[in-house]
Image (spheres, coloured by chain):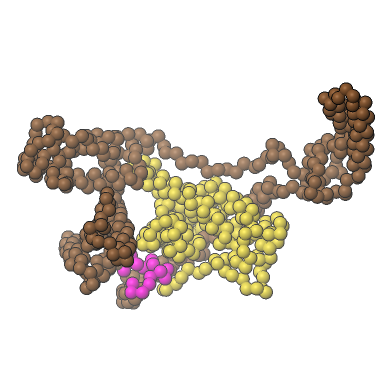
Chain colours: A yellow, B brown
Amino acid sequence: MNKKISEDSGSSQVYTTGSKSEEQKLIESAQNGNKAAFGKLIRMHQKRLFRFVYGLLNSFDRTEDIVQETFVKAFEKIQTFKTGYAFYPWIATIARNRAFNLIQKEEKKESLEKLTEVGFDPQSSDLGALDKLLNEENKKRLYQAISNLPVKYRTVFTLRHFEQMDYAEIASYLKIPPGTVDSRLYRARQMLLDAVKDLL
Amino acid sequence: MEHQFYIDRLSAFFDNELKNEELVIVKEHIDGCQECQAHLAELDKLENLISANSELSENEYWEQSAQKIESALSNNSDTLVIPISKKSSSSLWWKLTGVAASLVLVALFAFEQKDTGDEFLKDTIVDEIKEDYNNSTPTIEEKITKEESSEGRTEAQVKESTASDEVVYEKKQRESSPKIKHEIKQPVDNLQLKPVNKPQPVKLEKEQSKAATLKPQGSKAYIKKGSGKTELRTLEFKNDVVETAEVKSIVTQDNKEKNVTHSTTASEDKVADLKEIVNRDKKKVAQKKMAKSYKSTPSISTEVFEQAMSNDYEINYWRRRVFENNELLKKQSKKSAIYSKVQISKSSKKEKGTKNYDRSFLYKQLFEAYYNIAIKTTDSTEEFQSVQFLEKHANSIEKNYNSDALYYLQLYKIEKNKQKSKKD
């Protein structure tokens, strides 16, 4: 049961010299001004980045904007990227920083809605445009359940499950104590278990 | 330990985030607890479900999105530098001959005008010659415009670079020049950037703002003690902010009145009544002060606000006390380090206008704060850490305030037992 979430490729993975992957070649090519190479990098990573940002923001339009801005910014700063490191964590950091202010606003809005008991309905969120990107019923159910989480729980859940960040990293990013990360993640999982029990 | 303690830690255990003693304790419990093992199995299944179903599906949308991003990249294209051959020296020849001719003319005129001494006239003549020269010899710009305009082609502006032979052309695209296919630098005015949808600012609905129109007003009385005198003050609430009203009456220890605005004096009975008001309202006043300092939801009425945030703000108050006391202790330790080196006498330690807190007093405040956090928090990790702090200092022999830590630790245990008995 002592299972750690499996790490996808790209989380601070360092490539050894003499064994350059396709990604490394594309990065070097992009650093020389090759836009086509950067286009390939976009196609390699945009889905994963989209999933991550959507988990934070729960809004299709805003996610699109953030993803686009992230890749444009990454291309502008491609010269500063140190070769030998994985590309995805770098662009995920850019996206995370851009999404941070929007997350804070969303949290304040939600807490305000809870206080006044007007307009807050955790069951009312709809997948909307994301529906077209989920072709299986189980996926739709899962994303519906994730979308229904309160923003505080959803952000912690996304950072943990989609980005494999540890508690200390999540606490540092969201500026909350590690104990709070633990409790929010626990509650997020409880809510998800209740929502998707029949799928387990 | 209560079973809830272990349940609260299952998530962290599952993520390998527990360390040292906690890990050992929890692991030991799980090995013998079927309920916790079942819970862990559920977490495992949930994790598998997420891994299997979280990836977004293949769709033409991704290709469209990638193309959109690529077009956004191409809008930031740089100027293409086109190297050209060296400019001909014929223009230089023209200039030199012109200058030579003008000098000759100047010299002739000067010679002729020598007797009259009319230098002003000489200067004007020189200027006229220069002007004529400039007008007669064609510049590079004019040459090109003449050539190109005669052929009916596009206009062009040429900028000469003194440093290098490369010249950057700025041309306006026209329909009748298919041969010219250089990538050009658009002038700033003509740039058309594709608009990026910026996120709209969050706006509250009108209904929410309507609910927040209550603004409590009123007054409460309380006693303030300090520097040998007792004051009876009334507080007036304005717009959800506590504002201290003017002092209505001052009562000294001798029961003499000073600066009285009305003639009443606070008798012992009234003081006792007011003490009740103080105890009841201290909490509200502290909450309101914290609300003001945190700048959160100023437009929400106090009733709704207090109802929703009462527990959180009480705990936050104690958390802030912990933080403040720790900061003061750090400052104290720095001061004492300095003083021990310089060996300043005790009398000179106290600077004017600054308080010199006793370390034992600060620690007592800290123990009280941790005790309250341990009692009131819903976060079991925070409770555990607070109790750990109290235990650490209660068991310490070095300091002389371990008795305070022990006292609060015992209080905590008594309170916990009370809560247990209530549940049972």
Identify the main secondary structure in magenta.
Answer: helix
> Is residue B238 left or right of B122 when viewed as pictured?
left
- Tell me the quadrant of the picture where the N terminus of chain B can be found: bottom left
Q: In the image, residue B368 lies at what x, y percent?
A: 22, 59
Is B40 positioned to the left or the right of A50 in the image? Answer: left
The spot of residue B335 in percent (x, y) is 31, 61
**Quadrant of image for the C terminus of chain B:** bottom left
Residue B71 located within the stretch drawn in magenta? no
Q: Quadrant of residue B350?
A: bottom left
Q: Quadrant of residue B345?
A: bottom left
Q: What span is colored magenta in the figure?
A: B6-22
Question: Does residue B346 sit above or below A3 in this rendering?
Answer: above
**Vertical placement of B71 versus B29: above or below?**
above
Q: Nearer the viewer, residue A32 or B23?
A: A32
Q: Is residue B199 above or below residue B320?
A: above
Q: Percent position (x, y) of residue B35?
A: 32, 70
Q: Identify which residue, A94 or A152, lies in the foreground.
A: A94
Give the vertical position of B90 relative to A163 (above or below).
Answer: above
Q: Of all residues shown, which one is farthest toward the top? A: B116
- Counting from the top left corner in percent of width and height, residue A50 is at 56, 55
| Nearer to me, B14 or B145 | B145
Q: Is residue B371 left or right of residue A108?
A: left
* Residue B353 seen in render: yes
Q: Residue at x 44, y 49 (%)?
A: A104
Say whether residue B305 is left or right of residue B81: left
The residue drawn where x is 60% and y is 66% is A85
Q: Is residue B124 visible?
A: no
Residue B8 lies in the magenta stretch: yes
